[in-house]
Image: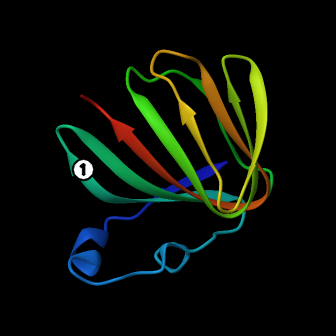
Amino acid sequence: MTEKRSKANVLEICVAQPQKLDGLIEYAQDSIVSKTILDKPIGTITLFAFDEGQKLSEHTAPYDAVVQVIDGRGQVTIGGRQVTVTAGELVIMPGNVPHSVTAEERFKMLLTMIRA
C-alpha cells in the first residue's frame, strides 16, 4: 500500500465557497490518498480516498473520531466489531479503541477527529 498525502492547502479552496466533498480528492491506483481540510488544536478534518482493497491497519487514537462515507463502500472494524459503511452513512470511532478501515470497493471518507 502506498499512502499519498497532499501538500495543497485544501482549506484555501474551501473558505466561504461551497464544495462537493467527493470532488476535493481523487483516487489513485493501489493507494490511499489523504488531504487535510482543517487542522486545529481541538481537532482535524481529513478527506481520504481508498483504492479497492486498500486498508488502514488496526491502530488506536486517543481521541474520538467520526467517519462520514462520501463514496463507495468500506469495512470499519472497531474494537473487533466489523461494520459495513456506504455513501451517506457515518460511524463513530471512540478514542482508545482499536480500529481499522478496509475499502471493499473504491471508497472516500471524511474523518473528523475531536481532540477536546
Examine the rendering and report whether any part of residue 51 can be seen: no
* 28 on left or right of 19: right
Instruction: Give whichever of 116, 96 is nearer the camera.
Output: 116
* Image spot of residue 70 (x, y percent): 61, 64
Q: Residue furthest bottom?
A: 17
* Image spot of residue 102 (x, y percent): 73, 43
Which quarter of the picture shows residue 108?
Answer: bottom right
The count of marks equals: 1
Q: Which residue is mark 1?
A: 39
Q: Is residue 65 above or below residue 23?
A: above
Q: Residue shown at 71%/67% (left/top)? A: 29
**Crowding near pointer 1: few (<14 within 10 Å), some, many (20+)?**
few
Q: Residue furthest front?
A: 89
Q: Residue furthest left?
A: 41
* Image spot of residue 77 (x, y percent): 71, 29
Examine the rendering and report whether any part of residue 5 can be seen: yes
Q: Is residue 46 above or below residue 22?
A: above
Q: Residue shown at 64%/69% (left/top)? A: 28
Q: Is residue 88 above or below residue 111?
A: below
- Of the 4 image quadrants, the one containing the C terminus is top left
Q: Residue shown at 76%/22% (left/top)? A: 81
Tag 1: residue type?
A: Asp
Q: Residue shown at 25%/69% (left/top)? A: 11
Q: Is residue 74 above or below residue 96?
A: below
* Image spot of residue 90 (x, y percent): 60, 48
Q: Helix, strand, or loop for circle 1?
A: strand
Instruction: Give whichever of 53, 64 is nearer the camera.
Output: 64
